[in-house]
Image (spheres, coloured by chain):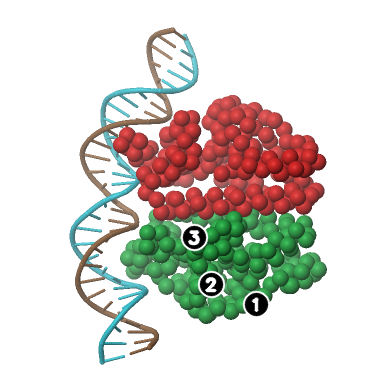
Chain colours: A red, B green, C cyan, D brown
Amino acid sequence: MDTFFEQNTSFFLDNPKLAEDFQKIVSVTKFPKHFIIHESGKVCDDLYIITSGIARVFYYREDKNITCHFAAEQESITAIDSFIQRKKSKYYIEALEDLEVLKISHSDLEKLFTSSPKFEHFGRLFLQQIYIDLVERLDDLQLKTAKERYETLLEKKPYLFQRVASKHIASYLNITPETLSRIRGK
Amino acid sequence: MDTFFEQNTSFFLDNPKLAEDFQKIVSVTKFPKHFIIHESGKVCDDLYIITSGIARVFYYREDKNITCHFAAEQESITAIDSFIQRKKSKYYIEALEDLEVLKISHSDLEKLFTSSPKFEHFGRLFLQQIYIDLVERLDDLQLKTAKERYETLLEKKPYLFQRVASKHIASYLNITPETLSRIRGK
DNA sequence: CGCCGAGTTGAACTGAATCAAGAAACGTGG
DNA sequence: CCACGTTTCTTGATTCAGTTCAACTCGGCG
């Protein structure tokens, strides 16, 4: 889960001064449905925490449009390769619904990390969490059948199936839309 | 690559005081070939940086022995799930050759992080790096054919093919030993 | 010397992809 | 608000990459 920020509101509750610093670098932004928030080939300078709506990260591989991340309310989203490495991104970010987000720039975030070891610590914990999540996802992809991956996602993020096009879910599960359709129709 | 520690010797060169602190918590340890350094079901308290030899992380899935990580000289290895989350590990760590490592305990490492924001920062960068590596690995597994995965590994870590049993490489590539054998015999 | 695990090779099988074609849903402009 | 074109979803038939199962060889080590 990258509901990490939500799970860690206690961090901010316990540190009102830090919460204030955090507030200062955050700006509320809106994007309409279908809007491409970030494009491949550019450096991604922002991290978003979604307050309303759903977005996805995707990229192209031999003309195929592959979704590698979904984020809904309380979850974070960015072009992680670019955001971390400060280089051109292979990813796009797309709003799948009308979106309201908290926008945080990379430079502001780095300043925040530098300003207080507590933030630096928080950043490390956040990375630990998403690392563990990724290990789990890799495991699923490696070891489970298409049907099992479907069932796992259905359990973890059921709302996706109500709110997101099947083809995106299919590519996220690394199966074709046809196979997903057959699994669902069983 | 998790040759990150090596790539960042400059960090230590630039900060002799920190290098000294780091030295203090590190202990040189040896394990014989085939030794199980860490067992599933236990909490893994140590991170190892290999100075000589090769080790692997593996686990069991329905009786199948699956390798999910290799580490050779200058690379780091631990039961990452347990080391980060402080819970029982699903992983084993095995020495594939006689091994000489630098051993760092979780508690000492945390103390180090707390002792100086520079270490905390270093820890965050390290996690960023292994996160990016994992994203790449996930990509490979998701999108490449068995043969392509073989070729990618051959390029990235050719020494594995000289030093490690084929069956371990096969499970790391998520293919059967039979398939790997056929690919190699092409 | 004989054993056992590892690697190889062959044949049959299978989960999921691909290809194809029709049905349903969507959104855009009139 | 409807009509039409486009995209998405479904369903069926075929194909294919990689697995499974089985038999055989090789090499190291007691």
Q: Are marks 1 and 2 in contact (CB under 8 Å)?
A: no
Quarter in which the N terminus of chain B is drawn: bottom right
Q: Nearer the viewer, residue A71 or A177?
A: A71
What amino acid is labelled 3 in the image?
A: Lys
The residue identified by callout 2 is B37
Q: Position of residue B131 (x, y in %)?
A: 59, 54
Q: Going from the N terminus, do you reach mark 2 or mark 3 first? A: 2
Residue B51 horizontal side relative to residue B184, left or right: right
Q: CA distance from mark 2 to mark 3?
A: 14 Å
| Label ID, residue A144 | none
Kind of element beneath mark 3: loop
Q: Going from the N terminus, do you reach mark 1 or mark 2 first? A: 1
The residue identified by callout 1 is B28
What amino acid is labelled 1 in the image?
A: Val
Disc 1 packing (10 Å; few <14; some 14–19; many ≥20): few
Disc 2 packing (10 Å; few <14; some 14–19; many ≥20): some
What amino acid is labelled 2 in the image?
A: Ile
- The relative height of residue B79 versus residue A41 in the rendered view (above or below) is below
The residue identified by callout 3 is B90
Q: Position of residue B48 (x, y in %)?
A: 61, 69
- Which residue is at a point 61% across and 36% down the rendered structure image? A74
Q: Are marks 2 and 3 in contact (CB under 8 Å)?
A: no
- Which residue is at a point 62% across and 34% down the rendered structure image? A50
Q: Nearer the viewer, residue B32 or A66?
A: B32
Q: Position of residue A78 (x, y in %)?
A: 61, 41
